[in-house]
Image (cartoon, rainbow, N blue to C red):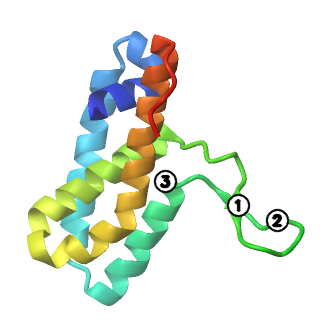
């Protein structure tokens, strides 16, 4: 699923063979981020991780009525942001095991949204309605 999502996020770059280069850069960035994360305490890591996941999620805007916040873009994800964020979350969960499970709850809605968007795109390309 990750490879397909990354190809969709890259669009023409993937078609020209640049996906391999981008994949190598993503892997190096994740390794660097994990290495830096291991040097942080929880008080420093928590806001960093929350900011990273917020960056990967669709933007929110305040409606004019002053009620709850709604997605500014109708809930559209930016796969180019979501997939690397999920790669980092996976690497942290694998490396830190039980220490990082607290953060899995924060990234789970993003992972669910990415998979739902992928399923919707697959269903749309196949001409069938997406299951809810």
Q: Residue furthest right?
A: 64
Q: Position of residue 40 (x, y in %)?
A: 26, 80
Q: Nearer the viewer, residue 41 or 6?
A: 6
3D distance between C-alphas at marks 1 and 2: 7 Å
Asked which secondary structure carries label 2, the reply is: loop
Q: Residue furthest bottom?
A: 43
Q: Name the residue beneath numbered marker 3.
A: 56
The answer to whether residue 117 is above or below residue 35 is above
Dots 1 and 3: beta carbons under 8 Å? no
Residue 63 bears which disc, if any?
A: 2
Q: Is residue 5 left or right of residue 98?
A: right
Dots 3 and 2: beta carbons under 8 Å? no
How crowded pointer 2 is (Cα within 10 Å; few <14, some 14-19, many 20+) is rated as: few
Q: Is residue 66 left or right of residue 30?
A: right
For residue 105, which quarter of the picture?
bottom left
Q: Name the residue beneath numbered marker 1.
A: 70
Dots 1 and 2: beta carbons under 8 Å? yes
3D distance between C-alphas at marks 3 and 2: 21 Å
Residue at 11 percent across and 60 percent down: it is 94
Asked which secondary structure carries label 1, the reply is: strand
How crowded pointer 1 is (Cα within 10 Å; few <14, some 14-19, many 20+) is rated as: some
Q: Nearer the viewer, residue 39 or 125?
A: 125
Dot 1 or dot 2: first in sequence order is 2
């Amino acid at each position: 699923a990750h490879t397909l999502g990354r190809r969709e996020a890259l669009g023409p770059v993937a078609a020209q063979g640049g996906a391999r280069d981008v994949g190598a850069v993503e892997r190096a960035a994740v390794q660097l981020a994990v290495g830096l994360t291991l040097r942080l305490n929880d008080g420093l890591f928590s806001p960093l991780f929350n900011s990273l996941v917020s960056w990967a999620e669709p933007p929110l805007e305040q409606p004019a009525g002053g009620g709850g916040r709604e997605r500014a873009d109708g809930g559209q994800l930016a796969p180019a942001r979501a997939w690397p964020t999920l790669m980092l979350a996976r690497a942290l969960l694998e490396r830190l095991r039980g220490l990082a499970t607290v953060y899995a709850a924060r990234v789970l809605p993003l992972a669910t949204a990415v998979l739902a968007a992928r399923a919707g795109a697959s269903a749309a390309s196949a001409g069938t309605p997406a299951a809810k």
